[in-house]
Amino acid sequence: MAKIDYWGELKNNIQRGVDGYNKGLPTGFKRLNAHISNIQQKRYTTIGGATGTGKTAYVDSAYLFHPYEFLVDNPDFHHSLEIIYYSLEIPPEEKLAKFACFKLWENYGINIDSKILYSEGEFNIPPEIVPLIDMMEPYFTKLQERVLTFRSSMSPNYMYKDIMSYAEKRGTVERNNGVVVKYTPHDPNLITEIIIDHANLITPNAEDKGSQKSAIDRASKMLVFFRNMFRFSPIVVSQFNRGIEGMDRKQQDSQEPLLSDFKETGATQEDANIVIGLFNPHRYGIKEHRGYPISQLKRRYRSAHVLKNRGGADGLQVGLHFMGEIGKFKELPTANDLKSNPALLQKILNKGKL
């Protein structure tokens, strides 16, 4: 068996940092970036929330769109990005439609959703938008080259085969008696994300005997293997259990996310380096949340809570502006900044632009 020089690896990683190769890719959320050190290799992140909090949109904004946009604007940046995306809830073509709506807003300030984009029912796409969509083709063609999408329900065994096949095309896998002992990537600066949306839809294998929790636990251990051995970066979307909706939480006025809300998908938060919980206080009739005027922001407001940050401090909370119709998140100014600048708050309320 090949002996691994861990001390040599440590020194190499320190030197890579000195040379600027450990900066990672930005998520688009400045205060969160500073707290979690951007998107890095060998980083397992779990994003959780109750139904309707925008978990998928958050992951797409932070871990797909913003880093991809950064690389488009900085083509000579030393990191590159590829994404293995298990979209177990939303078909890829629907996701691409949402992405097109996102870009229409970003590039032209046009706010339409996929119903208008497809001219469904009584809706019709304005004729002037069609050529704008055509102009986006080079952008989305390159995006699809970076994102490997799997649409059907997946078991941990199938995922393992997919990801291992990908790894063998991107580097050299050394084995001893069938056991992987070393991986040497062709491009040491490539960040590979493995996005699973969402964990609760992973299909149990025969050995799981129909147990969803067993399937999730085994999938999470598989992701730990690919993180540790291949330096891949899993990002797992997880549905909160029903406890957050219970009367006890309501009576205690404590419906902000907790690590215990991941009870049904416990391994995804136990194995993760970073755990972020999303919260929609408007859903619970809350008028003000940590200084933010929910009575004015209403359904546009979300709160991101860093519940776990291995190697760093947890407990950070960041206010986010959410446009659900196009799946866009944007970091809000601090609550104090909004209070001291009513014109800025009004601009957000009127236009949604920050």
Image: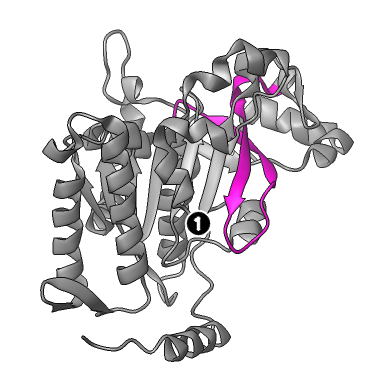
Is 322 contained in the magenta span? yes
Quadrant in which residue 91 is drawn:
top left
Q: Position of residue 101 (x, y in %)?
A: 39, 34
Question: Does 151 sit left or right of 220 as displayed?
Answer: left
Question: Does 86 sit left or right of 98 as displayed?
Answer: left
Mark 1: give few (<14), some (14-19) or many (20+) Cα within 10 Å: some
> Residue shown at 47%/61% (left/top)?
70
Q: Position of residue 56 (x, y in %)?
A: 41, 36
Question: From the image, which quarter does the N terminus lie in?
Answer: bottom left
**Which residues are drawn in magenta?**
297-326
> Residue shown at 33%/86% (left/top)?
4
Furthest residue in direction right, as rendered: 340
Furthest residue in direction top, as rendered: 122
Q: Which residue is mark 1?
A: 273
Name above or below for residue 157 compared with residue 120: below
Q: In terms of secondary structure, where does tag 1 sit?
A: loop
Please indicate, yes or no, whether residue 160 appears anywhere in the rendered image: yes
Name above or below for residue 34 compared with residue 185: above
> Residue shown at 14%/79% (left/top)?
176
Q: Position of residue 14 (x, y in %)?
A: 54, 85
